[in-house]
Amino acid sequence: MSAVTFPKSLLVDELDLPYNSDIVKQDEVVDTSRWSVIHELIFEHEGKHYRTFYSKGATEYQDESPWEYDEDVKCTEVELKEVTVKQWVDV
């Protein structure tokens, strides 16, 4: 697992994450809290793909933007692979 740290200014100001649909490959809600919705974000930058997480306010009354309190954002380099999974299903 290759961890990389990007300045928040690069992600938000230059790459327009998490809103830039040209480089965002996946943006899924993975958790919620009382005040926030937590997202997993996969994006492409300079030919590589990275995973990171961000949160936004859960309602219009929670004024929280992605990475609001971070100066640097930790990301993990990822690649898309086919994975076989066993799962219990109803019969």
Image (cartoon, rainbow, N blue to C red):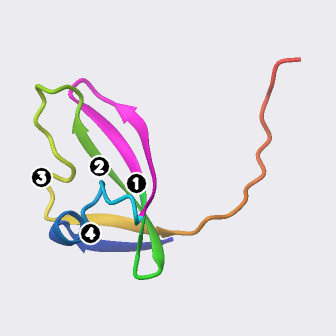
Whether the residues at callouts 1 and 2 have beta carbons within 8 Å, the answer is: yes
Residue 59 vs 10, above or below: the answer is above
State left or right for residue 19 relative to residue 71: right
In-front residue for pair 21/73: 21
Residue 79 vs 38, above or below: the answer is below
Q: Position of residue 13 (x, y in %)?
A: 16, 67
Residue wearing tag 3: 69
Mark 4 to mark 2 CA distance (whole Å): 15 Å
Helix, strand, or loop for circle 2? strand
Mark 4 to mark 3 CA distance (whole Å): 18 Å
Main SS, magenta region, reads: strand
Q: Residue at x 15, y 27 (%)?
A: 60
Q: Residue at x 72, y 59 (%)?
A: 82
Residue wearing tag 1: 41
Q: Amino acid at mark 1?
A: Leu
Q: Amino acid at mark 3?
A: Tyr
Q: Which residues are magenta?
A: 24-41
Helix, strand, or loop for circle 4? loop
Q: Which label's residue is closer to the chain start, 1 or 2?
A: 1
As drawn, the label of residue 15 is: 4
Q: Which label's residue is closer to the chain start, 1 or 4?
A: 4
Q: Nearer the viewer, mark 3 or mark 1?
A: 1
Q: Amino acid at mark 4?
A: Leu
Q: Position of residue 78 (x, y in %)?
A: 52, 68
Residue 14 vs 64, above or below: the answer is below
Q: Name the quarter where the C terminus is drawn.
A: top right
- Please rate how many residues cluster around mark 3, counting C-alpha atoms within 10 Å: few if below 14, some from 14 to 19, many from 20: few
